[in-house]
Image: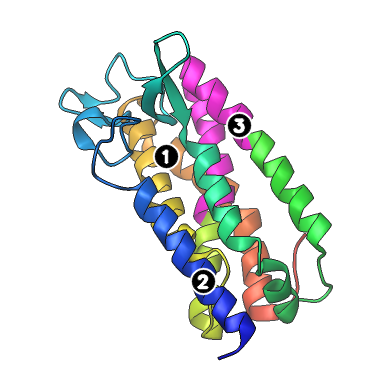
């Protein structure tokens, strides 16, 4: 068994464990996990996003230094877990399919910018919950999560090998995006047409990028 194969298996197992922890249905003393239905920030017995919810894109509560409950951000956490899965092997995997090559610094800088954008948009939406911000955030996550997940899944199927990031794409990116889409429709009363248009327009650049990577051996950016 090769060292690379062993490392890949190890990373896949580690990320799978993180996904299970993140989506665990048990409520701990430290936080209310995202799938704990009665106290979920998205869903409760009173309907989608109760009035006391910390925000659309936040989950879990824990005791702050002053004894008050605080919230943990979902979007940045989901993104970071995905990058953790990608980081050890994504650049070599990508360069085995695509010309011209990318570098580790480029990979890190691109993800750093994406992380900052995600924090800003999720923070604004959690604070003010405006429809316009929700639509912009939906478009951004259509690019960052939905289309990216489709890229990983398609690449895995077409090339018959592990695409670094595919586990979190399937276990976190797609479920989270679908849930967010439903919340934006039902809670913020954004129309289907607007939500779908935002998703498609946001996803198009990444979808084109993914098509070139998987089927043409080139890239859009």
- The numbered mark, 3 or 2, whose residue comes first in the sequence reads 2
Q: Indicate whether residue 19 is drawn in magenta.
A: no
* Residue under pointer 3: 119
CB atoms at circles 1 and 3 under 8 Å apart? Answer: no
Answer with left or right where residue 89 lies relative to residue 102: left
Residues in magenta, as a range: 118-146
Q: Is residue 151 visible?
A: yes
Q: Is residue 150 above or below residue 64?
A: below
Q: Position of residue 210 (x, y in %)?
A: 63, 66
Distance CA(mark 2)–CA(mark 1): 43 Å
In terms of depth relative to the viewer, which is nearer, 211 or 89? 89
Tell me the SS state at disc 1: helix
Q: Position of residue 79 (x, y in %)?
A: 55, 46
Q: Label for residue 193?
A: 1
Q: Position of residue 148 (x, y in %)?
A: 56, 58
Q: Label for residue 218?
A: none
In terms of depth relative to the viewer, which is nearer, 122 or 143? 122
Disc 3 packing (10 Å; few <14; some 14–19; many ≥20): some
Q: Is residue 84 above or below residue 125?
A: below
Q: Quadrant of the N terminus?
A: bottom right
């Amino acid at each position: 068994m090769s060292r690379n194969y062993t490392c890949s298996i190890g990373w896949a197992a580690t990320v799978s464990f993180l996904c299970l922890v993140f989506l665990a249905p048990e409520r701990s003393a430290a936080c209310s996990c995202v799938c704990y239905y009665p106290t979920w920030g998205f869903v409760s017995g009173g309907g989608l996003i109760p009035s006391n919810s910390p925000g659309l894109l936040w989950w879990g509560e824990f005791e702050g230094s002053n004894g008050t409950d605080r919230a943990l951000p979902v979007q940045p956490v989901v993104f970071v877990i995905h990058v953790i899965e990608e980081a050890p092997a994504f650049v070599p995997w990508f360069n085995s399919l695509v010309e011209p090559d990318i570098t580790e610094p480029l990979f890190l800088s691109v993800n750093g910018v994406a992380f900052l954008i995600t924090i800003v948009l999720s923070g604004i939406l959690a604070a003010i919950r405006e429809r316009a911000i929700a639509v912009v955030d939906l478009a951004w996550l259509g690019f960052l999560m939905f289309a990216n997940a489709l890229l990983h899944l398609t690449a895995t199927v077409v090339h018959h090998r592990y695409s670094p990031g595919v586990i979190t794409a399937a276990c976190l990116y797609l479920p989270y995006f679908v849930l967010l889409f439903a919340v934006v429709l039902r809670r913020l009363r954004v129309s289907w047409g607007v939500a779908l248009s935002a998703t498609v327009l946001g996803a198009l650049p990444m979808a084109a990028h993914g098509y070139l990577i998987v089927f043409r051996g080139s890239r859009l950016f």
